[in-house]
Amino acid sequence: MDSNVAIPAVQEEQVKPAARLRRRRFLDMSDVRFFTISLTAPAQYVLLFIIMFPLLAEVYISLTAWTPTRGGDWTQAYRFWDWGRNYVEVFRDLAFWQALGRTFLIAGVAVSLEFLLGLGIAFLFLDEFPGKRVFYALMLVPMMIVPAVAGYVFWLFFQSNGPLNAIISLLIGQPFTLTWLANDVTAMIAVIVAEVWEWTPLMFLIMLSGLVGLPEDQMRAATMLGATFWQKFRYLMLPMLKPIIIIALVIRGMEAVKIFDMVYLMTQGGPAQATETISIYMYKIAFQQVRWSYAAAAAMTILVIMTILASYALRPLQAPQREVA
Amino acid sequence: MTRRPTWQIVLRYALVLIVVGLFTFPTYWMVTMAFKPKVEWSTAHGTIYWVPQNPTLENFETVLTEYRGKFFRANQSSALPSIRSSIIVSIGGTLFALLIGTLAAYGLSRFSVDTGDLPWYIALGRLALLILVLLPFMVLWAWLGIIRYWYGILSFTLLGIGADQLIGRLLALYYRGPTGSLAFSILQLRMFPPMAIVIPVMIMWSAFKLIDTWYGLVAVYGVVTFPFVVWLMKSFFDEIPRELDEAAIVDGASNWGAFFKVVLPLAKGGLASTALFVFILNWSDFLIALLLTTRDWPTIPVFLNSLVSSEIGAQHGPKAALGLLAVIPPVVFGILIQRYLVRGLTFGAIKR
């Protein structure tokens, strides 16, 4: 990037006398370096200011055995210093690793389903048909619904006397009363269904814009040469859509592992720990069991794991980002 | 299109109807629930009501007025304060994020500023170094007993920022490539669940007496959503030819003048859609508001969650009514900016 030299060069040539006069002044408003710094500094320092203390406080607490219920003020936590026993405990805690695994399971299943559904629905919307705009708008609504509200709606939906069981009863012709959210497997299915419902529209939108942007003449050439739909899909569309597909999967995957609102409102991580994701796990440790130092250690461990994963996950984003644009 | 046989058109139409029907049903259920009188809320009376038989506005009335001995617990108040709080906090957070984010985005777009996209071992190594340096000070500050007060936190934060800058300089001596700064490597932590940082934020906020205030929430929302502003606005600024700023400067405008009078007006549409998008994000938040508000400033999602039923199924109607009210702004704004929605949700990686 040679962008940073372009403007100073122009300035030096055109407004030289004025610039030379101004250079003596403290906090020179016309100086490009000062300008650049004053553009990015507010963001940088506001972020540092808000992140710095919480981060260090978290590390500090995680190295002690302090809890709000025992040992009074958090500043006195050094009295309970225990050289990172919490971290050893996190590594030994089966519930932690299970919650992590469950998070990736939910994210993996949900994102794959979202992708397949989104791609399929995008094909349906590829051509014009009467009423397309209305259906298109309706299709986008779920992703704009506040997740907390969506969680509540799906909680209603999966009640034993809710609409889902009523539909199933109608279909099989006899009363069907499964308490979806009280059973390990069905609660998991319910959470994934809610997640897929909310975010398939995003996948649909991304895939549709990808399909619309495909070069038309190549498609037409393939059709004239007698290619079937499957051949066009496999050898033309899929390779050309690949960068967009990767970006969509990575971004949805990164968001999906943060899942909290839906699960919290639908099952609270239950029954027992059946739908406990990593966010719910930390919430329970910190606010139900009130083990703050342990929660802090778990949070730091998550930070390390997620940083490593994110840097690998983001790698495919960096190269194609410019091409797709 | 004209060559397609009729059965294909019919099949496609049927599929579209089924798919859209499935995806619309939960929303439909909530909307109808909001207008149903109490008898129709559940199947307890033997039948399920697909369409409200006696549509009523009673639920909206219940949720928007004070407790009248009807469905809620005795301490139940109206939802109006939470609606007010949601509006204030979302708008404030959006403005804050726009203010710092737009400037940073222009810097990233026009000047080669370090974006801090560094390999994880550098990011983590830098973090570990910072923690090693600062931890003794943390313990010292705690031992002195000043960390619990605002001046202790302030002085510690300044010390931390200084240490971070120093480590950045040192790293730049030995490592070629972006060394980033803690601030911009935050962008790399997009995957990081907010739950993990919110506990110490609660501690800091209570020291600053920011818990359960609108400005406390505004600050957190601004920081959480500002990366979206940076990446969205950067892609809008990138589309504006650099020659325009240069022309403005040649014509005698200052750097700030070129930005405010030439570039920003051209990016107006992008700025508006970014604002609406960030507003939707703030409006939708549940977790942060759940942990940082208690009595005075709960937002709509938190209030919705606090409507605990004493009798199962007792208040589906009012809850759905409030949910419907909460959903209207994001859906309206979302439809308005649907072209930019993908860009926002993919962090600007897909630009159509």
Image (spheres, grey):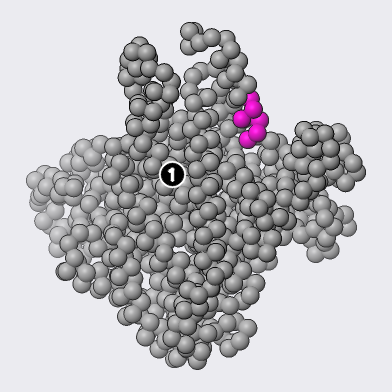
Give the dominant element type of the magenta stretch: helix, strand or loop. Answer: helix
The outermost residue toward the right is B45
- Left or right relative to B12: residue A238: left
State the SS at label 1.
Answer: helix
- On the image, numbered disc 1 is attached to which residue? A249
Q: Position of residue A68 (x, y in %)?
A: 60, 82
- Left or right relative to A177: residue A73: left
Return the residue nearer the eye: B14 or B269. B14
Q: Residue at x 57, y 50 (%)?
A: B283
Q: Indicate whether residue B19 is drawn in magenta.
A: yes
**Image quarter hosting the C terminus of chain B:** top left
Compared to residue A166, the image places residue B125 above or below, namely below
Say which chain tag 1 marks.
A
Amino acid type of the residue that numbered disc 1 sits on in the rendered structure: Leu
Q: Indicate whether residue A125 is drawn in magenta.
A: no
Q: Position of residue A308 (x, y in %)?
A: 37, 61
Q: Residue B215, can we see it? A: no
Q: Residue B2, can we see it? A: yes
Q: Residue at x 64, y 60 (%)?
A: A274
Magenta stretch in the rendered image = B17-23
Return the residue nearer the eye: A165 or B96. A165
Q: Residue at x 42, y 36 (%)?
A: B269
Q: Position of residue B335 (x, y in %)?
A: 55, 34
